[in-house]
Structure formats: structure tokens, C-alpha cells
């Protein structure tokens, strides 16, 4: 009786192990590459303001506030100091070199270089260093979501075509691997997206509000799977 109980017990222990290592059903797969494209619009530009200041040491505590105030007089915006270098010249004056950044609407770019020049004074020189029409992170993420939505739709359409051609075989979407989004400037943007304000501002001043866009493309590898027919 003891030997019979031990044999039954060992058989029960072996059942889960056998089930665990049971081979998975063989899958037939079809892999398809898809690509979609769309435009990523933006109506704001990233503006970089260069500031060069020569101050007395006693005035150093006020310089940051003065730089921000001068930037806001150049154009109303949420200016941030993104770079700061400090040195002392031979005359004992502290020299500050700073970069300030904000995003401005298209309508605020006209005359920006002139306003920066007017905001300069002895001991403080302001110049526009860069105007960049790259979309914001929120605009880029919205475009990515839209591209993924298009790829989901394309994958579903291809699945329907595959099942229509496969007869009794029923494929499903087993996996989608999305690629990186590639941004390509529009040809009209090449003239506007430069590193100096001298070339940008006359172009912007020629007309009113203008929405600039970048073409975005996204690729995806879609894997369709179906159980292989039994022999």
C-alpha cells in the first residue's frame, strides 16, 4: 500500500512539470513593414538672446534681474537664462555672457533684432542669436500619437486583406515594433530656420501670421501570427 501511494504521489508531481514544458503551438508568421507621414505644425519659435554685460562687483546681484527685464522689453515672454559665463577683465570689471531663451509667436518676431539693439546700453549689449522653428515637445508628441494611430489603422486594414487571402486561416496582430520619428523641414522653412536673426526677420516681416511645419515619418514592423495547420 505504501509503495502504491508513493507511486501515485510521484505521478502527481510529474504532471505540472510535463505541462510546463509542453511545446507551444507552431505559429505561422507574416511580417510587414509600414510607413506613414504627416505634418507637425508650429506657430511659435524658439528664440535665443545673447547678452554681454560689464558691471561693477557691487552690482552683480542685480544683473540677473536686469538681464531678464531687458529680455522682456525686447519681447514679452517667459525668458529663462540657459547659459551663464562670468569673468573679470583687466580693468577689474566683471563681464557676464549669458544666453536667454523663450518661445515667441510668429507675430512677435518682426523687428525683434531692432528691439534688442534698442534695449542695449553702455555695459549691456543684446543681440538675437538664433530663431528656431522646431516644434515643441507637446506638438511633437501629438504628432507621434497621430502617426501611431495611422499605423494601427493600416495594420488593421492589412490584417483584413491577409485573412481574406488566407482562406480558413485566421491571422491576428501579434506584434508591432514602432521606429523612431524622422523630422524633415519643409522647403519653405529652409529660408526661415537659420541661426541669425538678420536673415529670419525680413522674411517674417514680409507677411502676417504663418504656420510652419515639418514633415514627420514613422515606420513600423507588424507581425501577423496564426497557428500552423495540424498535419
Image (cartoon, rainbow, N blue to C red):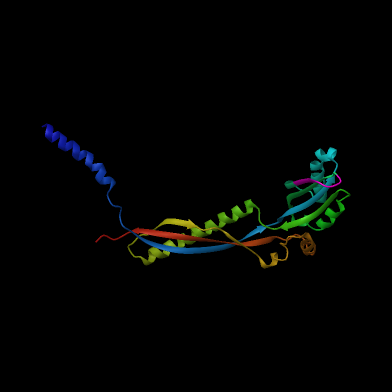
Query: Which quadrant of the structure image shows residue 182?
Result: bottom right
Q: Is residue 49 above or below residue 13?
A: below
- Residue 12 image position (x, y, % from top left): 21, 39
Q: Is residue 121 left or right of residue 211?
A: right
Q: Residue at x 86, y 46 (%)?
A: 91
Verify whether residue 86 appears in magenta: yes
Q: Residue reaching furthest top?
A: 2
Q: Is residue 72 above or below residue 33?
A: above
- Residue 101 image position (x, y, % from top left): 73, 50
Q: Nearer the viewer, residue 139 or 201?
A: 201
- For the N terminus, the quadrant is top left
Verify whether residue 167 appears in magenta: no
Q: Is residue 78 visible?
A: no
Q: Nearer the viewer, residue 150 or 119?
A: 119
Q: Residue reaching furthest front?
A: 90
- Residue 13 image position (x, y, % from top left): 23, 39
Q: Residue reaching furthest right?
A: 122
Q: Residue at x 53, y 56 (%)?
A: 148
Q: Residue at x 87, y 53 (%)?
A: 118
- Residue 160 image position (x, y, % from top left): 42, 62
Q: Is residue 91 left or right of residue 16?
A: right
Looking at the rendering, the stretch of residues picked out in magenta corresponds to 85-91
Q: Residue at x 59, y 53 (%)?
A: 141
Q: Nearer the viewer, residue 189 or 2?
A: 2
Amino acid at each position: 500500500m505504501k509503495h502504491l501511494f508513493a507511486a501515485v504521489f510521484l505521478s502527481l508531481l510529474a504532471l505540472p512539470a510535463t505541462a510546463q514544458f509542453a511545446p507551444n503551438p507552431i505559429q505561422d508568421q507574416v511580417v510587414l513593414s509600414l510607413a506613414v507621414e504627416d505634418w507637425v505644425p508650429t506657430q511659435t519659435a524658439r528664440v535665443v538672446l545673447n547678452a554681454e554685460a560689464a558691471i561693477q562687483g557691487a552690482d552683480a546681484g542685480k544683473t540677473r534681474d536686469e538681464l531678464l527685464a531687458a529680455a522682456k522689453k525686447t519681447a514679452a515672454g517667459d525668458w529663462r537664462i540657459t547659459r551663464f559665463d562670468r569673468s573679470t577683465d583687466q580693468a577689474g570689471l566683471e563681464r557676464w555672457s549669458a544666453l536667454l531663451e523663450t518661445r515667441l509667436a510668429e507675430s512677435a518676431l518682426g523687428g525683434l533684432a531692432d528691439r534688442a539693439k534698442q534695449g542695449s546700453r553702455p555695459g549691456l549689449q543684446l543681440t538675437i542669436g538664433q530663431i528656431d522653428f522646431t516644434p515643441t515637445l507637446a506638438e511633437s508628441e501629438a504628432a507621434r500619437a497621430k502617426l501611431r494611430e495611422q499605423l494601427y489603422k493600416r495594420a488593421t486594414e492589412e490584417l483584413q486583406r491577409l485573412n481574406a487571402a488566407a482562406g480558413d486561416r485566421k491571422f491576428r496582430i501579434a506584434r508591432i515594433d514602432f521606429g523612431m520619428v524622422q523630422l524633415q523641414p519643409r522647403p519653405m522653412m529652409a529660408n526661415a530656420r537659420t541661426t541669425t536673426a538678420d536673415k529670419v526677420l525680413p522674411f517674417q516681416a514680409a507677411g502676417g501670421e504663418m504656420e510652419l511645419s515639418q514633415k514627420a515619418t514613422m515606420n513600423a514592423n507588424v507581425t501577423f501570427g496564426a497557428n500552423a495547420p495540424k498535419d
